[in-house]
Amino acid sequence: MKQNNLKEIQHSDIFARIPQMNYLPRWGVLLLDILLSSIAFWLSVWIGSGFLHYVNLYQQPIPIGVQFLIVIFTQVLAFWAFHTYSGILRYSTFIDTLKVLLSNISVGFILVIFNIIMDHSAGWHPLMNTVLAIYVPTAFVLLFSLRVGVKTLSENLERNQGSPLVMIYGTQSAGVAIAKMLRSVGNMPYRPVGFIADADERHGYDLAGLRVRELNEKLFAWMSKRNVRHVIVSPLKMKEINPAKDLQQFIDHNIHILTTPYFTQWENLDDIDLQRIGRIDAIRIEDLLERPQISINTENVRQILHHSVVMVSGAAGSIGSELVRQIQQYEPQVTILLDIAESPLHDMVLELQKQYPGSRFIPVIADVRNRERIEQIFSEMRPDVVYHAAAYKHVPLMESFPNEAIQANVLGTKNMADMAVKYHVQRFVMISTDKAVNPTNIMGASKRIAEIYVQSLFRKLHAKDENCTKFITTRFGNVLGSNGSVIPYFRKQIAAGGPVTVTHPDIIRYFMTIPEACCLVMEASTLGEGGEIFVFDMGEPVKILDLARNMIRLAGYTPEKDIPIVFTGLRPGEKLYEELLNQKETTIPTVNEKIMVARVREFDFESVSKEIDHLIKTSRMSKPFTTVKIMKQLVPEFISNNSIYEQLDPQ
């Protein structure tokens, strides 16, 4: 019977939890502190009596054992008052040390006051002042040594576990906080060995116990020698630098770049909740391509959107969904979410209801190609502002289905624009593309025809009524992370072990983040007086081959060695580089340096409208060559590239 009870105890949770304990419970820390305080008392007695000869143990008014109990009882009360036992020893901080110091000082102060009171009232003091004078610093040293010793031992043990070494790029408060986090918080995957400062910054000194080194070739040699293959870029540093240029040197040296989530700048490091910033992620290619935050005139946008009925077509898409999110900060009366994709729209509505509980959304399943359905929606909803983002956008697919491109991009835009006029929409903003400039593919040409329609429609209306619907067009290039774009595609290929497929070694593209593009769209919608085509500053073009190589390096692989790159040839309709303006077009600046107005060729609405109607009618006949031939007549600069429709171009 006793043996069975013993086995039950051995297999109980009490013993199962022992190997899983990675810290002492509070009562354990308290017992250790009491033990060290006891040692400090008897050590003080020994020093006072046997070493300094200031204490005579045989002439005390009360026994030394009773004095010991008084001191330890008072010390325990001080431990309780300052909660010195509440922290984890191996994560001890300056605050923990300060608590221990204050508890010891308070013990000395209380007992000295106790001696003075007893001396005045009874003519004798129960405790030895010399022992108290020695006890206070001795107890602090022992308690402090316990915490420092456990912390140092823990760090040394963790270092022996083979954690990768890491440098921290950035010496401001955020960089110091990251170093502090890595050295003090448990289960961190990296061990910091130093800071990196730019060439024009101070270096060659120690910061938070780590060396600050200059960013140069000597640093990379030093890192290679010591097998330091990781760098963490502090959030403040990311805001100071141009990631695409300043971090390239790390990529070129096969250094794995890491970062923490963006968080606000801290003024006082003591207030940092280190557990809150504990996530460390590999930097993404989007972070390298992202540019400084754009500032727009939010007051102008607010005047247009505040308490307005706003409709967004293609609301479940990459651009449309971000437009919807940004619109909410201006408190519209209601936002109409128009899309043909049922599941993405449903998911979008659930996300918005959770993220913006105070906003009102009306999801509408509809096809912009269905004129009767679109008119029904406009007549019922009566929108004040329309952002038209619904479109087919994939170049190779549209090259195979030109009739569908016309139906969605041209007929869909025509239906939306016509209803906007009929139901007195104040502003109609069309989302276009850089592929509409000197188009070499069906998709770009269809968007150019849609541009022509809305621009010529406005010119006709404005000639009769200056208060007519303002039609505004915005052009920009590729957006980072949009559905079906090159970056998610490359990421999947790298995750599968390659190869990464690039169409041509010299192909380049302009890139912009989705929030950046939508931000400029909203600003352009306030700047336009109607009929303008706004062009965005897309920054420097990016070579797709370099993009692929950098993504492979950021994933921790070596291009061509670990992950092969295969050139597949230009796809139908694809060209090596995109243009934001036609060669004959010029631009004029606006109040926002990121937005320009394109001067484009103007068309007579009556004649171009008949041609577009003929094009739409032809596209219903399933005769792609006839459709494309009419497109080329409407847009003479449309010259096909790597396409079966090249035979329709003049030789």
Image: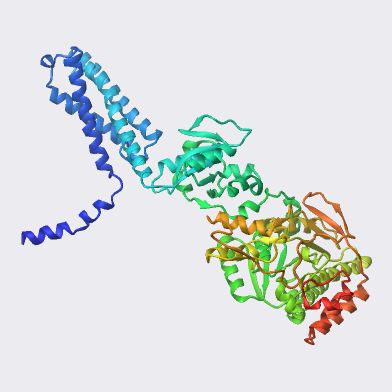
Quarter of the image with the N terminus in it: bottom left
Rendering coords of residue 348 (x, y %): 60, 68
Horizontal arrangement in the rendering, residue 100 relative to residue 70 (left or right): right
Mark yes or no: residue 266 visible.
Answer: no
* Most foreground residue, 93 or 492: 492
Residue 23 vs 326, above or below: the answer is above
Which quadrant of the view contains residue 121? Answer: top left
Rendering coords of residue 495 (x, y %): 53, 64
Residue 45 vs 395, above or below: the answer is above
Residue 413 vs 352, above or below: the answer is below
Horizontal arrangement in the rendering, residue 599 relative to residue 407 (left or right): right
* Most foreground residue, 646 or 51: 646
* Most foreground residue, 97 or 649: 649
Count of numbered marks: 0
Quarter of the image with the C terminus in it: bottom right
Rendering coords of residue 589 (x, y %): 84, 51
Q: Residue furthest left?
A: 1
* Most foreground residue, 86 or 438: 438
Rendering coords of residue 637 (x, y %): 87, 69
Mark yes or no: residue 2 visible.
Answer: yes
Which residue is at a point 87% across and 60% down the rendered structure image? 583
Q: How are the residues colored?
A: rainbow
Q: Residue furthest front?
A: 561
Q: Residue furthest bottom?
A: 621
Which residue is at a point 56% across and 52% down the rendered structure image? 283
Which quadrant of the view contains residue 33? Answer: top left
Residue 139 vs 283, above or below: the answer is above
Which residue is at a point 55% across and 59% down the rendered structure image? 561
